[in-house]
């Protein structure tokens, strides 16, 4: 368990042997092995990941957007579900943009989310998932606002890193 000094060699003094020994195990590991790094992702993989993340955000955001608090006997509506859905979209876009090191990938992610929400807002038959109420409007129009703001934030962060 504990680090024991090695036994002295017949031709060395104990003080010389202790000076050669590395200070701890992590220092010895980093000196002997190079760091492992993955190759950069390919462009098609980045675009597929951004589209998948956007579709996932669109589906999850659509299922979340309808939650609201009704205050003053329904006179005031606070659409907290739509705000959380937009926060989800912005965080996923931020992750994908920083992972890919491109702010344009955020736009692709947001476009996929907007397309997904647009398809789910179609009134096919008698039911549409996103209706024309306050929560639906905040969610649909919020995607169009949150996406360029997130791309702008990713652009600022990436420029500050270089």
Image (spheres, grey):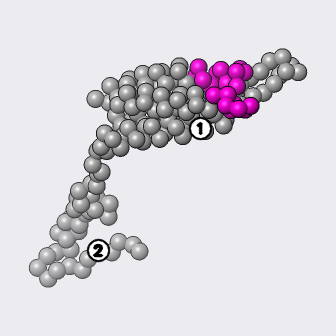
Q: Are marks 1 and 2 in contact (CB under 8 Å)?
A: no
Q: For the view shown, which residue lies furthest in the left direction?
A: 11
Residue 17 shown left or right of residue 108 in the figure = left
Q: Dividing the picture into quarters, in which one does residue 48 lie?
A: top left
In the image, is residue 152 above or below residue 117?
above
First reached walking from the N terminus: tag 1 or tag 2: 2
Q: Report the residue at 21% width, 74% height from top.
A: 14
Residue 9, quarter of picture: bottom left
Relative height, residue 54 to residue 150 (above, below): below
Residue at x 24% of width, y 80% of height: 7
Question: Label 2's element?
Answer: loop
**In the rendered view, does 154 fall on the left or right side of 8?**
right
| Quarter placement of the N terminus | bottom left
Q: Is residue 157 above or below residue 4?
A: above
Give the farthest residue toward the right.
73
Q: Relative to 2, does residue 38 appear above or below in the rendering?
A: above
The reply to whether the magenta stretch includes residue 140 is yes
Q: Quadrant of the C terminus?
A: top left
Furthest residue in direction front, as rendered: 125
Q: Which element carries disc 1, helix, strand or loop?
A: helix
Q: Nearer the viewer, residue 33 or 8?
A: 33
List x then y, in percent, for residue 115.
Answer: 52, 29
Q: Quadrant of residue 156?
A: top left
Residue visible at 26% across and 62% down in the picture: 28
Residue 150, percent from left and from top: 47, 25
Residue that mark 1 sits on: 59
The answer to whether residue 141 is magenta is yes
Badge 1 local density, few (<14 within 10 Å), some, or many (20+)? Answer: some
Q: Which mark is residue 5?
A: 2
Q: Crowding at label 2, few (<14), some or many (≥20) Cα neighbours within 10 Å?
A: few
Give, as a single range, the part of the protein colored magenta: 121-142
């Amino acid at each position: 368990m504990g680090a024991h000094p090695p036994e002295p060699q017949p031709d060395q003094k104990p003080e010389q042997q202790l000076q050669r020994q590395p200070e701890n195990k992590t220092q010895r590991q980093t000196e002997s092995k190079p760091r492992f790094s993955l190759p950069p992702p390919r462009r098609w993989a980045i675009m597929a990941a951004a589209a998948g993340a956007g579709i996932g955000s669109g589906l999850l955001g659509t299922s979340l957007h309808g939650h609201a608090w009704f205050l003053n006997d329904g006179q005031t509506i606070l659409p907290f579900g739509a705000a959380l859905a937009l926060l989800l979209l912005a965080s996923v876009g931020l992750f994908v943009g920083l992972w890919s090191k491109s702010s344009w990938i955020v736009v692709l992610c947001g476009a996929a989310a907007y397309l997904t929400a647009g398809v789910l807002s179609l009134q096919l038959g008698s039911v549409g998932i996103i209706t024309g109420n306050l929560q639906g409007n905040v969610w649909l129009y919020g995607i169009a606002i949150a996406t360029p703001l997130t791309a702008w934030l990713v652009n600022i962060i990436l420029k500050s890193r270089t």
